[in-house]
Image (tube, rainbow, N blue to C red):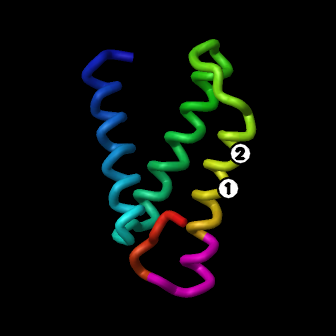
Amino acid sequence: MARASASERSLSCHLALVACRDGHGNSHLVNELMRAVYLSWYLQRAGYGNQLVEQFKVAEYAVENTLAHAHETGSGGLRLR
């Protein structure tokens, strides 16, 4: 991956996280976070990093829980919980 592409991807994920933490998330931003979780998992599987598998499961659960909570409550601004 080219450096510019990696930087753009990193910025996109960071902004999505900040927006969701501040209660300004939407389904697109939550999808960005899920892509970041999966990309991190695949990079780890390729030999980059040494995080515990449980950490990826926790991150995936947090994103899924955010979407489920938004659907249950009908809230517009998604907040990462």
According to the picture, the residue beneath numbered tag 2 turns out to be: 57
Tell me the amino acid under the disc marked 1: Tyr
Q: Which residues are magenta?
A: 68-75
Q: Quadrant of the N terminus?
A: top left
Which residue is depicted at the point 54% across and 77% down? 70
Q: Is residue 3 magenta?
A: no
Which residue, as the protein is rendered here, is positioned at the far right?
54
Rendered location of residue 59, percent (x, y): 61, 48
The residue depicted at 25 percent of the width and 22 percent of the height is 4
Q: Horizontal placement of 49 versus 36: left or right?
A: right
User: Helix, strand or loop at disc 2?
Assistant: helix
Percent x, y for residue 18? 34, 55
Overall secondary structure of the magenta section: helix
Quadrant in the picture for residue 40: top right
For image coordinates 45% across by 71% down, the residue present is 78
* Relative side of 30 to 40, left or right: left
| Vertical position of residue 15 compared to residue 79: above or below | above
Answer few, some or many: residues within 10 Å of disc 2's Cα (few below 14, many 20 plus, some between 14 and 19): few
User: Residue 55, located in which quarter of the rendered image?
Assistant: top right
> For the residue marked with disc 2, what is the amino acid?
Lys
Residue under the point 47% across and 83% down = 75
Where residue 45 appears, as percent x and y from the top left, is 68, 20
How far separated are the C-alphas under marks 1 and 2? 6 Å
